Amino acid sequence: MTRIKKSYIVLLCLVFPAILAGCTQNDILYEADYNVTLDPSNTYYAGEPVRFNISGEIDNLLFYSGEPGSEYRYRDRYEVPMEAVKSATLTLDIFPQYGAIGDGLDIYYTNTFAGLNRNDADADKALLKSLEESFAAGDMQGWTEVEWVEKSGSITTVTIDVTEMKDNFVLAFHWHPGGDPAKDIQRTYSVRGELNTEIEGIGTATTDLGEFLVTTVMMNDERENPYATENAEGNIRFDDSNYDIKFQGVAAGKLDYSLDGWCVSFPQAFNSIPNDKGVVIKNMQNYMSTYEYTYDEPGTYNAVFVGRNANYLGTNEKVKELSIIIMDKLYFGDDEEGTGSGATE
């Protein structure tokens, strides 16, 4: 049996398209051949749309505006130098409910903890028990306890400067409602929060407490799997739409033991950031000859278009960059007809 190489088939498709009607454009990887120019009608004022004219053949087109968070040069940047982190502030809202005030939620943070094992429950329980005993004896081992005043049915807000923790931050909650489980309600604590990090050249990055990676460990021997979580009473829950973490207590007599659980975040560095992303403005399903984008602030922006053709043979990509100067209209009075000239390709 004679075998015909795929490269020969592609060549036949190019030379004899009428003969080989079965060939399709998917058998050929076309060059990303397109161009982007600035429309002559552009005024280049903040708040007014900039129109880009698009010509040529391209399957997919990605746009980076050049604004913070959408800069092509930072498409593969996932962290900044640690010295660029200028400040970090953690804010927590803590809402105790049901039962008597009992100081049943302790909160700690550190930058000296390597994290839990997460695969060896006995080892993690032993480590947490050791920490608890050390804390009770006044040996904080590099941890700091968050000071907060528990109030019945009222939210307590605490704000903590954690800038010094920026290289290896760990947050831990120890939930231990206490009391007599046969007679006392085991208290519920709902917590929400956010970490605001000020990064030089980027601005403020906000991370919700719900975005933290955490490990929960129930210390009670009655729990077959200490790591297991369940959206039910007597558990550490993550299903509340108003709070990031809920330490859900139980009514008196529902359990014959006092709940004891930890929620510990993975160690994290504050210099980790999301990479800058572009916006897909064209795909194979839509035709596009123009694209408009509005810059709200004056400044110089490096707008970048990434055109890409791709199929099973591979990918062909072409990048088109345009430098755009956006002016503040206030500096030019009320002249609606004025035209900026600060754009270059």
Image (cartoon, rainbow, N blue to C red):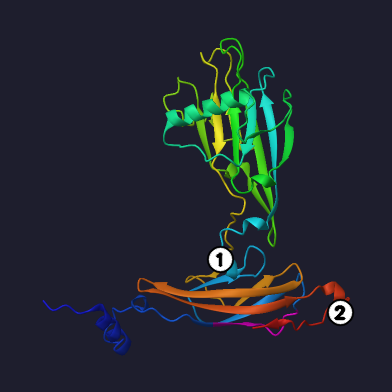
In the rendered image, the residue lying farthest to the left is 1
Binning the other alpha carbons within 10 Å of mark 1 as few (below 14), some (14 to 19) or many (20 upward) gives some
Q: Tell me the distance, in whole angstroms, between the alpha carbons under discs 1 and 2.
A: 38 Å
Name the residue type under label 2.
Asp
Residue 39 part of the magenta segment: yes
Q: Position of residue 53 (x, y in %)?
A: 61, 81
Residue 260 quadrant? top right
Binning the other alpha carbons within 10 Å of mark 2 as few (below 14), some (14 to 19) or many (20 upward) gives few
Image height of 292 relative to 92, above or below: below
Q: Which mark is residue 222?
A: none
Residue corresponding to mark 2: 335
Residue 120 quadrant? top left
Image height of 62 relative to 191, above or below: below
At a point 48% along the width and 70% down the height, the residue shown is: 285
Residue 208 quadrant? top right
Name the residue type under label 1.
Arg
Residue corresponding to mark 1: 75
Per the image, label 1 sits on a secondary structure element best described as: loop
Residue 124 visible in the displayed image? yes
Q: Position of residue 278 (x, y in %)?
A: 58, 66
Q: Position of residue 149 (x, y in %)?
A: 74, 27
Q: In the rendered structure, which segment of residues is drawn in magenta? A: 35-43
Q: Is residue 29 left or right of residue 167?
A: left
Q: Earlier in the sequence, mark 1 or mark 2?
A: 1
In the rendered image, the residue lying farthest to the bottom is 15
Q: Is residue 26 left or right of residue 95?
A: left
In the rendered view of the protein, which quadrant contains the N terminus? Answer: bottom left
